[in-house]
Image: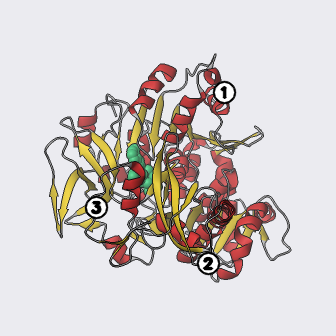
Amino acid sequence: MSDYADAYAQFSWSAANERIDWQAGGKLNMAHEAVDRHVAAGYGDQRALRWISKSGEQRDFTYLELQKQTNRFANVLRNQGFERGSRIFSLLGRRPELIIAALGSLKAGCIFCPLFSAFGPEPIKARMEIGEADALLTTAPLYRRRVQGIRDELPTLQKVFMVGDSDTSAGHASFDALMAQAPEAFDVEPMAPEDRALLHFTSGTTGKPKGVVHVHEAIVAHQASGEMALDLKPGDVYWCTADPGWVTGMSYGILAPLANRATLIVDEAEFDARRWYDILQEQAVNVWYTAPTAIRMLMKAGTDAIAKRDFPDLRFMASVGEPLNPQAVIWSHSVFGQPFHDTWWQTETGGIMIANYACMDVKPGSMGKPLPGIEAGIVETDGAVVRELREPLAMGELALRPGWPSMMRGYLHEDARYGACFRDCWYLSGDLAMRDADGYFWFVGRNDDLIKSSGHLIGPFEVESALMEHPAVAEAAVIGVPEETAGELVKAFVALKPGHIASEELLLEIKGHARRHLGPAVAPKEIVFRNNLPKTRSGKIMRRLLKARELGLPEGDLSTLESDET
Ligand code: WT7
């Protein structure tokens, strides 16, 4: 894309559709677009993936090898009785088997659902129940810690594939052994554009997590947005630091870059400033997609970590998931000689919707402009009516005109919740934003109680429910409190049942309980006791009031307040 306005004016999804290697009868398959078509076009020897293990060992896969491995897994699924539409879940760290399983499942026409490996048993159980998981891929240690205790509560689960472990004593299948026996050839399932492909869970303010359904046709948007927003070109070395347990790690960690015939760098290890700078330099990364929390950690690590380094290959850097501070963009100019390009989207949108493009000036602090093919607006809702606010810098809800290929096709089993996202031919994002006179969008905040911590969306309800399961807890309210690096931290207010006395010991016990049930990614970092929590007359806890008090902000309308904290 050399000129944004031209590209925006000329783009059409039907033209983007023509880039797909369509099969007979208007069929396609995401995994064919990501892998097999490149092999067929003569790029089988190109590296598709370089995996760096925690200890620094490297393993490479060419497109041809990736094709064979994903075919093998598709055969494994078939041999084990899984069909089109079967739900294959993973609970794995960043390792090649996760990518192979995802693409192999898609080849077999199964629906793939990655779970974040730092989830505890409660979030895992809720997601596997809602998603009616038929199979799970995991490792023996993750299984022992996170799944064993809930195994009996998952009636739909037929098979557990153990990765990197040949112990099949508990009736589990050995991924490695089955892969070794499976044939390398597989006829990829031709799928209709609207056939389900991926399931990603996202949190709600109330109720259970939402299973967001994406279809095979989404790959059209992944390919196009990878090219337009991330500047991906065939042969690029590309590093997306997101975990495939979340939508970014799937859409832009696997699908978009492979559809654009890039080479993925996948690092198994957790964040480490020196390691990250090493990877950027030694792997000669061309395009880098990361997140504000990580960027802030790099800024904090200071200049020592970056001393004597040079990144001549780095061409484009982008960020997603939370507000990217203007200081981070200014810092990146001084360290990398180029800005981070902020991008905005959601689990629901399946792909990038608003971005700063390589051909466009970055306004530090702005999310950029709508992707060609996407119409975005700032709106005000009044019942069923949606009014677009066109005056520059008017604040309202960020809304999109539905109709792009990677848009969700539903929340599993929750038609009403899905329907509530749309009004008057708009999709309402739940984010508050503004648009300036030049057409750049600026993030203001969320319109709801969801918490963004280290880029992960956390639903307060899920955390509150786990806290309430502790025998001493009568009520719990959970909010996000601002924190410099992670953006927000999860904080819980807890009222005890009669007969329980607040103590440091009990606090630690409840904290431990939350961590065991929710896992480190979701559990509250801070818990405080209250005698009572502020509630409305209908008994709903007023998280907003707790948050306002916590932050010293105006308390707003208190007319519905029934009982208050003491
Ligand atoms: C929410 C969606 C983006 C895919 C991964 C996260 C927030 C996202 C930005 C940004 C400020 C952002 C929004 C959005 N968000 N990108 N560039 N600036 N906020 O997907 O977990 O569904 O979260 O993340 O609040 O609604 P998600």
Q: Amino acid at mark 3?
A: Tyr
Q: Quadrant of residue 391?
A: top left
Label 3 sits on a secondary structure element that is strand
Q: Residue furthest top?
A: 308
* Number of numbered discs: 3
Of the two numbered discs 1 and 2 in the rendering, the one whose residue sits closer to the viewer: 2
> Mark 2 or mark 3, which has the lower sequence index?
3
Query: Which residue is nearer to you in this view: 204 or 169?
Result: 204
Of the two numbered discs 2 and 3 in the rendering, the one whose residue sits closer to the viewer: 2
Q: Is residue 335 above or below residue 534?
A: above
Q: In which quadrant will I find the C terminus?
A: bottom left
Q: Amino acid at mark 1?
A: Glu
Residue 295 appears left or right of 375:
right
Residue drawn at the location 78% of the way across and 40% of the way down? 55
Query: Which residue is nearer to you in this view: 25 or 551?
Result: 551
Residue drawn at the location 38% of the way across and 66% of the way down? 542
Query: Which residue matches tag 2?
Result: 499
Residue drawn at the location 14% of the way across and 58% of the way down? 387
Where is residue 338 shown, x and y percent of the image? 44, 24
Label 1 sits on a secondary structure element that is helix
Label 2 sits on a secondary structure element that is loop
Query: Which residue matches tag 3?
Result: 427
Of the two numbered discs 1 and 3 in the rendering, the one whose residue sits closer to the viewer: 3
Q: Is residue 546 above or below residue 391?
A: below
Q: Quadrant of residue 175?
A: bottom right
Check disc 1: other Cα within 10 Å, few if <14, some if 14-19, many if 20+: few
Where is residue 354 shown, x and y percent of the image? 34, 45
Query: Which residue matches tag 1?
Result: 282
